[in-house]
Amino acid sequence: MRILIVTAGSRGDVAPYTGLGRRLQEAGHEVAVAAHPPFAGLIDGCGLDHRPLSGDPRELIRARARAASWEEARAVMAAFLDRLADGVAAAVADGADLVLTAFGPAALSRAAGEASGIPVIGTFLAPACATREFPLAGATDAEDLGPDGNLAAGQRLLADAGALQADAVAGLRTRLGLPPAASRTTGADVRPVFHGFSPLVVPRPADWPSGVEVAGYWWPARPHGWRPPAELADFLTSGPPPVFIGFGSMAPGEGERLGELVTAAVARARVRAVVQAGWAGLTAAGDDVLAVGDLPHDWLFPRTAAVVHHAGAGTTAAGLRAGVPAVPVPAMADQPFWATRLHRLGVAPGPLPLADLTAESLATAITTCLTEPALRRRAAELADAIAGEDGAAAVLAHIGAVR
């Protein structure tokens, strides 16, 4: 079967699908991943075909940050979504028997699949169906609003997402010769849906409808032939395990400011650190600090004493898999949800919002991670339990049943 995976966004929105794609490939399927051009090397390096989606999410983040008003920011997003819609349609038209879609482009994938007569399955990295049990990621700053409030907040979030994409979806349907949709569609309308996170981290809500499942994590594939840089390998063996610090795709253009903050925090906490540049261009200095670029978290994180990160879904998962405590520094979208979840799971101190981060607060949180035995013990226990799961198995079983 020819399977196309459609995803959009940052590296954390792409990497888990390389692992799912490789499992599908090993089961005998032909697999392509439609993603933005900056991730072509990652996808190709994992042995999967890449189909380009228009636009660079880094430029989108920068443009939204420069926008002087909500109307201007919305116009930037609308233009991006129009280009993304055409990219999704082209990727599907290149040939597929089945489409697996991330939540972000799900409504576009559904329209393209309908036009081509191809079934579409949701493969989402964060909860994307409203529930009374918790507010959806991005609906609030992860504060529990009570059953009715949680459900209402989730429904508003999905309605807002549908409204933001409405013009792009309608335009795509027109270009594909489809009739107007009977109702406004969102990614939550796709069925079936498999969520790529552990039920130990977010149990499946009892009020989710049939066909919406929690499958377990899809671990990113490691690029074929990857080897750790010699400088990194030497650094890791030259002293005690370091702390990892990286903010992923957050804060582009703020690398210098954050670098000074991180340098001061590392000195205050008296730790060694591996600092990842990310899209911020984060830099840090010091005899006990090593700056690195992109590299597989599944290799690095188990070799660290703790991980400081922005609490994106993918990085959160990698930290849980490694069994080390975390310092979550959320900035936006689903990050406050995962940051709060880490704290409630007992593997992290309270979240430190990126906008309020100081050298003092970061140093204190790092020290807590390294000196509080309960955090490390709970992280190790949870990692052991998650290791027994197979998140790809449910997706593979469903595909096998419908072939």
Image (cartoon, rainbow, N blue to C red):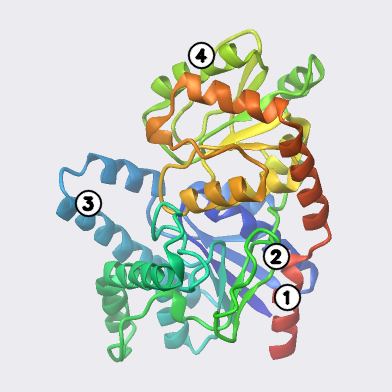
Nearer the observer, disc 3 or disc 4?
4
Q: Residues within 10 Å of mark 1 (few under 14, many from 20)?
A: some
Q: Which residue is mark 4?
A: 264
Nearer the observer, disc 2 or disc 3?
2
Nearer the observer, disc 1 or disc 4?
4
Numbered circles on residues, count: 4
In the image, what residue type sits under mark 3?
A: Ala
In the image, what residue type sits under mark 4?
A: Ala
Q: In this view, which residue lies farthest toward the front?
A: 146
What mark, if any, has residue 394 been given in the picture? 1
What mark, if any, has residue 161 been given in the picture? none
Which part of the image, by quadrant, shows the N terminus? Answer: bottom right
In the image, what residue type sits under mark 1?
A: Ala
Q: Mark 3 or mark 4: name the one nearer the start of the chain.
A: 3
Q: Which residue is mark 2?
A: 216
Q: Which residue is found at the position 46% from the left and 73% from the top?
A: 130
User: Are circles 3 and 4 on residues that touch, CB within 8 Å?
Assistant: no
Q: Residues within 10 Å of mark 4 (few under 14, many from 20)?
A: many
Q: Mark 2 or mark 4: name the one nearer the start of the chain.
A: 2
Residue nearest the observer in this picture, 120 or 130: 130
Q: Which residue is mark 3?
A: 73
Give above or below for 376 relative to 44: above
Secondary element at tag 1: helix
On the image, which quarter does residue 27 sit in? bottom right
Give above or below for 232 relative to 166: above
Q: Position of residue 338 (x, y in %)?
A: 54, 51
Q: Mark 2 or mark 3: name the one nearer the start of the chain.
A: 3
In the image, what residue type sits under mark 2?
A: Gly
